[in-house]
Amino acid sequence: MMLAPKARQAIEQHACGCYPRESCGLIVSGEYIACHNIADDPLRDFVINPLDYAVAEDLGQVEAVVHSHPEKSPLPSIADVLACEAGRVHRWIIMTIHMRHGELTAGAWHEFGPPEDGTPLIGCEFAHGSTDCYGLVRRYYKAALQIDLPDFVRRHKWWADGQSNLYIDKYAEAGFHDVSDSQYLQVGDVLLMRIASKVPNHAAVYIGDDEILHHMWGQLSRREALPRYRSRVTHILRHKAIIPDGTH
């Protein structure tokens, strides 16, 4: 979505005025409508005041939801992605605000939307070769990061043939770098794991707060605590588009 300079300036001014709390607002007919954040913890989250939303809808069609990430990456949290997926407005904009040398500065912007095929990120049934662990990684990257990851033919039980090592063979082609020596995890990192296999045969996305998004064989896709799987992690992969600091 191309924003007019006037709307962009209004978003930045509102975000600076709300710092260190998250600002929130709506784009209606190309103009920014500032709203009140009534979240219980506005330093980490946002909830648009329903009265503000109703006033905005009276002015015209809501085209986008906007909020700020003070001192954080503009990449969406999993809560942002799921709210976008469940909501009526399918275009979201996030901007960063940083305090530098006593002055507030608007930083990077990021736009995203729900999975284009309508397949939910959480609660989806498993189907090998499509809605499987790598399929979930692809849908997350497209919805949250606007990155198209290549699809790969995945033969049934390729991890048990004694020859294939699909994730290791293909991660560079998909735009990832091995950062297994990194001292920290970054939102969007892909964690390769061995689940009853001699080769890495499972992939999960790190979504922050020590949680992963993944899809296990025969189960529904879900978010889960990372510590349960940490001993199974073999590689940490980071996409070239989100190196070094989570912005692109």
Image (cartoon, grey):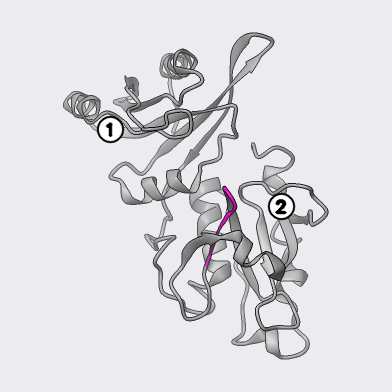
Q: Nearer the viewer, mark 1 or mark 2?
A: 2
Rendered position, 154 above or below 236: below
Rate crowding at label 1 as few (under 14), some (14 to 19) or many (20 or more) other CA atoms within 10 Å: many
Marking on residue 75: none
- Residue extending furthest toward the top: 102
Residue named by callout 1: 62
Query: At which x and y percent is residue 207?
Result: 56, 51
Among the 4 quarters of the image, the one containing residue 180: bottom right
Residue 247's quadrant in the figure? top right
Q: Quadrant of the N terminus?
A: top left
Name the side, left or right, on which 134 lies relative to 222: right
Q: Indicate the position of residue 23 as horizontal and vertical percent values.
A: 42, 24
Mark 1 vs 2, N-terminal side: 1
Residue 69 is situated, as x and y percent measured from the top left of the image, at 52, 30
Identify residue for label 2: 238
Front one among 189 and 196: 196
Q: Residue at x 32, y 22 (%)?
A: 36
Is there CB contact under 8 Å for labels 1 and 2?
no
Residue 150 visible to the viewer? no
Secondary structure mostly taken by the magenta-highlighted segment of the chain = strand
**Residue 10 is one of the magenta-drawn residues:** no
Let me know if residue 211 is in the magenta part: yes
Check the image and report above or below for 63 versus 206: above
At 83% from the left and 54% from the top, the residue drawn is: 181
Amino acid identity at mark 2: Arg
Q: Is residue 128 visible?
A: yes
| Identity of the residue furthest to the bottom in this view | 161
Q: Over which residues does the magenta segment extend?
A: 208-214
